[in-house]
Amino acid sequence: AAGATKPPTTKPPTTNASSGDFSVAGTSHSVGGSAKQASTSASLSGESLQRLGGYKVLQELGRGGMGSVYLAKQISLDRSVALKTIQAEWAKNPRVIARFIREAYAAAQLTHHNVVQIYDLGVEGGTNFFSMELVGGGSFEDLLKKKGKLEPKTAASLMLQAARGLKFAHDHGMVHRDIKPANLMLTNDGLVKIADLGLVKTPMAEEKVEEDDRDRNVMLASARSQVTGFGSTMGTPAYMSPEQADDATSVDHRADIYSLGCTFYALLTGRPPFVGNSALEMITKHKSEPIVRPERIVEGLPPDLGGIVEKMTAKKPEDRYQDLSEFIADVEAFLGTDSQKPFSPSIEHANKLKQASDVFHSVPMTKLRTLLPLGFFVFSFILFAVLAFFSLRAATAVVLMAFATPLAVIALSSFLQSESALGARLREVLWESGWKDWLYWGFGAVLILIIAGVLGLLPFWIGALLVSLGIGAAYHFIVLKPLSGQRRESLDAVEGILRELRVHGLPESAVQQFVAEFSGKNWEELFEQLFDYDSMRMARTALANSGKDKGKKRFQPWRDAIIDRLNARLREKRQEKEHRMLANVERASLRAAGLNDAEARAQAEDFAATLVTVAGEARNSMLADFSFGPVDQKAAMKREKIKNMLAEARSGKFSKKETFGQRARQALIAHLFGSKYRFLLGAILVAGCALWVKQNNLLDPAKLEQLRQAAEQGAAQATEAVRNKNADAIQDAQSVLATSTAIIGETQPLAVFPLFDSFAQGVIGLLIAGSALVFGWRYSFFATAAALIVLLGSRLGIPSVGPVSAAYVSAGVALVVMLVGLALGRMPMKST
């Protein structure tokens, strides 16, 4: 889906030394180290060069005037990426680097099926880094080297996809200025992606491509072509429009249409429209010589295509297609049926998809994967019920095991199965977490161990955790891993169907709609395997909005809230990192422009905050607008708004939305009263309750057995009263409470802190600590009020009600306060 990258399911790139079927195209994370370190020589056997921040650099793939490209592994997500570095010499001009970073950062917010995703940007030690999506099917340049020229319909379908991606960029105010076969990539699934969008906007020195050792195989040729350089005219002469040769800074989207036409020409004929011995000679031909129509070079080529290419490559911009939508319509008509209707999947396609989907869901391990968790929870419930008669401590261990085992499965999937959407996000959260986060989690773990030790539960809990880890490992290796292998054949069959649809020119959104609608009621898991989790969520929403979700089932919907929370956490961390990077770059640029350090720092901080906010709004709007079908007027208006926001972001000008002092106060409040505060508050209540229980020896086995018998007797009395239709609920409750009180005996408030005097504080403490996983910082005010009420209830005048003591009435009031906090506005899920 538009806006969705594919972190959990990206397949490793394939290599083919004879055909060059390996290529890279971009994405970015903030990485450490230096370009000098990164260029350290390494063998071609795949051994590691260096670790740059969160990346393990495997091999240098190419080098050019801008910098170098490396094949790297992003450690947090265990995925391969293309890692680019910018040469240190460009950092000598801070204003150029700042403009470059703004362009690239704006482009990183654009997400589309046919555009290579820039994941992140970073600056470390004066060196700029980009990590980008790794595309494993080669570039159009590789394709031309391998086949010479393409069959007309194949060429047209590939150009149609490229035009859709480029139109998306144009609609959002981006002009590529270096469209050429080397910058058009092809995935293993037949999806075309435009590379280097946002990375080719800043004029610098002429590109100087260095020749690598000839021992490097053909795969490096494609890689080298992706190390985008910056020429004085910004572009590649063989594919450059006439006006771009004169003034690259003033060209509009029609220059890209010309370059795309030259690329189309090359796919149809095997060579660009003009060749020469020098850049000047080729530029002169572009300006003055008429193009030789493709059908005059390749016999039998449809004249319709020749006319399309000729219009794309008109010398004057006003004589070309004025918008890529016109070109797209003409190519769709060429690829249509005899009746000139646009191609759409046939009944045969739908039947094949449904058959493959049925096979996908009917492999033997599928049922086992469903039955085993259900059986495990039934077994845990029975075991708990049995052990509760003999040892309450052992019974609590069973409860812990029931909760810890699913977590063990998720944790193992995080490190052993990269396809897990939840696992991938957990890994990234752990990787992005700082020392304060680890201190927070460590404190929580220690506190839990102390409470378990005080209550005499530690040996039971440790045993439960070990059992959970063993069960989780067995489930992963016996069920989940074989399940993936059993489904591979059906997935390959579906991917073959989708490749065929793409060849016929079906838009990627329509391809995804086809899978969502025709793969059966259990479509979500198959869809997620083919695309990714984020795409599945957006497709689910699109189906619901179109009313086509009737009878459709959800796959593991319990993940959604957890993943949303993790995404919020990752978003916050990413924005903090982006803010630091942008502020540092802008500060250097402003100082180079003559501002003093104080002024430069203040303006850079304000600009970085605004740019991050604008970029986030633009990205969220694009994701929210995803739908199956044509774009409506409302979506078009939002697109124009996004275009204006991104243009503002790239311009370096901004309207200040809030001052640095305001942001600082908000950050202080968020950190003082955020989720960590609530966790600490809840932990204190639970710990105090545990110490009170220990002091009063309330977990004495003899007392627990007497309490169990009293509860059974009370339940029997209530059942008998109901059967005789003379139930007196209050009298029965008073009888049970009186018996329980007599068994427990006289309790004393906690000696070191007398406010702890009942189980009520522990119950409310658990709820407050649990709220740290869900709510934003504003909920902390309600949590604080609830804690004060449950501790000071009787002192605040809250009375007993019948047999219910003031402590438990206070707990009820505290619970109401927490629910009111939830009801007031449904607090935003903002990680703090």
Image (tube, grey):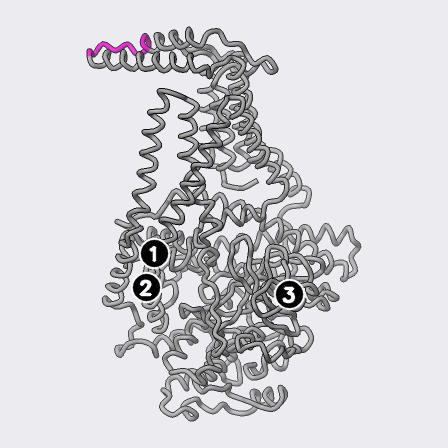
Horizontal and vertical percent position of residue 681:
56, 27
Horizontal and vertical percent position of residue 694:
52, 17
Closer to the camera in the image, 778 or 414: 414
Asked if residue 563 is positioned above or below residue 347 in the image, the reply reads above
Distance from Cα at disc 2 to Cα at disc 1: 9 Å
Under mark 1, the amino acid is Leu
Residue hosting label 2: 494
Q: Which residues are magenta?
A: 724-732
Mark earlier in primary sequence (3, 1): 3
Horizontal and vertical percent position of residue 367:
28, 48
Query: Is the residue marked by circle 1 packed among few (<14), some (14-19), or many (20+) residues within 10 Å?
Result: many
Closer to the camera in the image, 187 or 653: 187
Asked if residue 634 is positioned above or below residue 774 in the image, the reply reads below
Closer to the camera in the image, 783 or 79: 79
Residue at 43% across, 54% down: 419
Q: Is residue 8 left or right of residue 831?
A: left
Asked if residue 385 is positioned above or below residue 308 in the image, the reply reads above
Mark earlier in primary sequence (2, 3): 3
User: Regarding mark 2 in the picture, which secondary structure is present there?
Assistant: helix
Mark earlier in primary sequence (2, 1): 2
Residue 725 shown in magenta: yes
Residue hosting label 1: 526
Horizontal and vertical percent position of residue 78:
51, 56
Q: Is residue 424 left or right of residue 590?
A: left
Residue hosting label 3: 85
Viewport quadrant of the C terminus: top right
Viewport quadrant of the N terminus: bottom left
Q: Is residue 335 left or right of residue 196?
A: left
Residue 747 shown in magenta: no
Under mark 2, the amino acid is Val
Q: Are marks 2 and 1 in contact (CB under 8 Å)?
A: yes
Residue at 35% across, 20% down: 389
